[in-house]
Amino acid sequence: MRLLLATSCFLLFWFISPAQIKTSATATTTASTTVNRPKLVVGIVIDQMRWDYLYRFYDRYAADGGFKRFLNQGFSCENTMIPYVPTITACGHTCIYTGSVPAIHGIVGNAWYDPQKNRNVYCTEDSTVATVGAEAGVPGAMSPFNMKVTTIGDELRQATNFKGKVIGVAVKDRGGILPAGHSANAAYWYDSRNGNWITSTYYMKELPKWMQDFNAQKLVDKYYGMGWNTLYPINSYVQSTADEKSYEATPFGVEQKAFPYDLKKFAGTNYSNICSTPYGNSMTVEIAKAAVTGEQLGADNITDLLAISFSSPDYIGHAFGPNSVEQEDDYLRLDKDLGSFFNFLDAKVGKGQYVVFLSADHAVAHVPGFSKENKLPGGIAPAARWSQDLGKILNEKFGSSRLIIGNFNHQIYLNHQVIDSMKLDVNAVKRTVIQYLILQPEVGQVFDLNKLMEVPLTAKQRDMVANGYNQHLSGDIQVMLQSGYMEGSGTGTTHSAWNPYDSHIPLLFYGWNVPKGKTNREVYMTDIAATLAAMLHIQMPSGCIGHVIEEVVK
């Protein structure tokens, strides 16, 4: 009886299985045979954008401009923070596209002291490559070699078997190179020696024809001929200080302290000053359009990525500050440039066929003079005097004034070769430096980085310092200034601190499959790459520590 039952079950399975298999096969063939992705991903990083610029200038942004398109049709992460220090350019661009932090990806500043090489290192320097597009020189000897992990562009390249193109463009070399990644088809940046856009032999042996044609236009001279006056009547800039302030720098010459700025004299002679005007943004938009057309980005169903960084807000912000007429005018003009670029993408790639995000590599502090004028905390930290004092103190106590070899990114690097050769107690040297600095009124905290977990810091401060600390490249002693204080000369401003004025940045998504809305929950710069990976159904970058922003991908 059991044998008969078993035989009957076997026969039943035999006759049913083909039907089940056929049904399954039919379901498979009717399902989508391709992964649903946009034709183009556009990443926009604005170099030095405070989150509050979105709303401080909101009423002045154009209805067809870029910022209102993001805010009214896209998704805004209102409480996006940078999770590390120092909050500066190279670190920010790298973190956005890698989803990682300096502790892992190795870009610990725009520059740093490398103990193994026994010299200062620039973030994108590479002596094994050469300039392409101009005479030989340092501006072209650049690559992403110093970045130790992959970017979202690298992962997209791998996911498409290297058929998808990845291009980076920025006035600053680090703003174009680091976001594009290791396997990028190209990164282009501006050569202020000659007004051309260049690259390096890391990517190619000669510029493509479309780039040669672009350079031949010499747009920089055209912009210089236009001069820089305010876009609207200057008395309508009610969100800014008076136009001329003694604490603002004078990048166009000491004789030019207020609007309008005469730029004609720079044509053909000085190609760097364009960076300190909104025309640096306009030029970047035009190069981005040329790249889309010349490289046929978004022209087929294989997803491409274009990484754009707008460098001019940083130049303008450093010189004039976040409360200046110059910076307000810069953002009103950038808004129009972004609107023009989106209209171009709508026509070229197709509305709804591309996804774009906008964020910043860092924000910025008030100019100390502005803070003093308005009774706000802040001022100048006399770093040069501290260095002189420490040299004398160390010489008197240990017999050498050469025990400190550098000060980068608010970290003091000790000269371990001298300390070791003199058989000094390195911990005694550290204690001496710390005891001096903690008595300075501009200093909030100062501590031995090897004892970070023992220092009484807030959890946020400790996490940010730890995320920025790279055991191979970081310094010995961390200095954290009081709120609003910075190293400097007394004019202009800077960034690099843990405080929200430097670390609270915008994050906006718009376009393909992006819902309309916003979230006020805290998210991080490092979440951008993870979110893009989820949207594109690809692997997240190799050093990514971020999390998917679920509200954007639902």
Image (tube, rainbow, N blue to C red):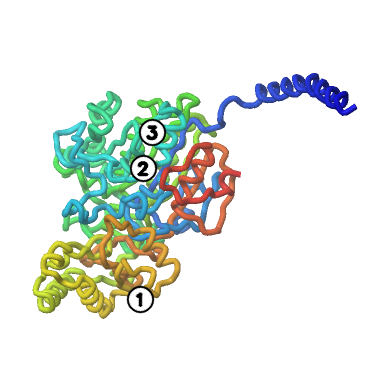
The residue that mark 2 highlights is 179
Apparent side of residue 22 relative to residue 320 in the rendered image (left or right)? right
Find the distance from the CA under tag 3 to the CA under tag 1: 48 Å
- Locate the C terminus by quadrant: top right
Q: Tell which of 351 and 100 is nearer to you.
A: 100
Q: Earlier in the sequence, mark 2 or mark 3?
A: 3
Looking at the rendered structure, the kind of residue marked 2 is: Pro
Mark sitting on residue 375: 1
The amino acid type found where label 3 is placed reads Val
- Residue 6: x, y in percent? 83, 26
- Residue at x 24%, y 78% (from the top left corner): 435
Question: Left or right of 262: which side holds 63?
Answer: right
User: Is 252 on the left or on the right of 448, as rendered?
Assistant: left
User: In the rendered structure, are the residues bearing label 2 and label 3 in contact, judged by CB atoms less than 8 Å apart?
Assistant: no
Residue at (35%, 71%) from the top-left corner? 483
Callout 1 amino acid: Lys
Which of the 4 quarters of the picture holds residue 371? bottom left
User: Disc 3 or 1, which lies upstream in sequence?
Assistant: 3
| Residue 238 shows up from this direction | no
Question: Residue 199: x, y in percent?
Answer: 25, 35
The residue to which callout 3 is attached is 166
The span from disc 2 to disc 3 (Cα, nearest Å) is 10 Å
**In x, y percent, where is residue 101?**
38, 53
As drawn, 489 above or below 168: below
Q: CA distance from mark 2 to mark 1?
A: 39 Å
